[in-house]
Image (cartoon, rainbow, N blue to C red):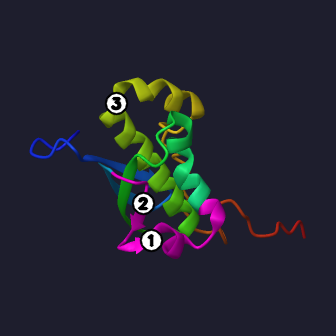
Amino acid sequence: MANETDTNRWYATGKRKTAIARVWLTPGKGEATVNGLAAADYFGRPTSLMIISQPFAITETTGKFDVRASVLGGGKAAQADAVKYGIAKALTRFNKDLRPPLKKAGFLTRDSRIKERKKYGQPGARKRFQYSKR
């Protein structure tokens, strides 16, 4: 869904666990900002930065877009995955021909695994109290 008023900006939402990322792509030099900070300062870990850059590496668009992301909820790793999913969706809105490589790499599939709720009468989601025979 490209903005009707601004055709040089593409928006997508990415989700992972309880993290939600709103991602805007604009043509640029490859700079990424997350919640107003540089991605390297926000995430800190090199693995998170690598996760964010994967959609660009697959589609050979590294350094062609600036990323502005707003994330909330979850932890840093889940937020990085949410940003990656948002970037992949925004790239498909930029160019439909980029969809097959992103789909093949699994970047356009929402990872729907979330924490299972705790059940009543039990100490946790699946753990049971110890059974006593006598």
Q: Which mark is residue 17?
A: none
116 vs 93: above or below: below
Q: Which residues are magenta?
A: 28-48
Residue 134 among those drawn in magenta: no
For the residues bearing labels 3 and 1, Cβ distance under 8 angstroms: no
- Read off the residue under disc 2: 31
Q: Amino acid at mark 1?
A: Ala
Quarter occupied by the N terminus: top left
| Residue named by callout 3 | 95
Q: Earlier in the sequence, mark 3 or mark 1?
A: 1
Q: Are marks 3 and 2 in contact (CB under 8 Å)?
A: no
Q: Amino acid at mark 3?
A: Asn
| Residue at the disc numbered 1 | 38
Sequence-first tag of 1 and 2: 2
Which quarter of the rendered picture does the C terminus lie within? bottom right
Count neighbours of disc 2 (C-alpha within 10 A) and say few if under 14, some if 14 to 19, many if 20 or more: some
Q: Amino acid at mark 2?
A: Glu
* Residue 120 horizontal/vertical position (percent): 56, 67
Q: Is residue 47 magenta?
A: yes
> Under tag 3, what secondary structure?
loop
Q: 90 and 18: which one is in front?
A: 90
**Could you give the CA–CA distance between mark 1 and mark 2, rounded to whole angstroms?**
8 Å
Horizontally, is 132 left or right of 31 in the view?
right
Res 118 visible = no
Quadrant hosting residue 127: bottom right
Q: Secondary structure at mark 2?
A: loop
Residue 99 screen position, x and y as percent: 43, 28
Residue 32 versus residue 28 in the image, above or below: below
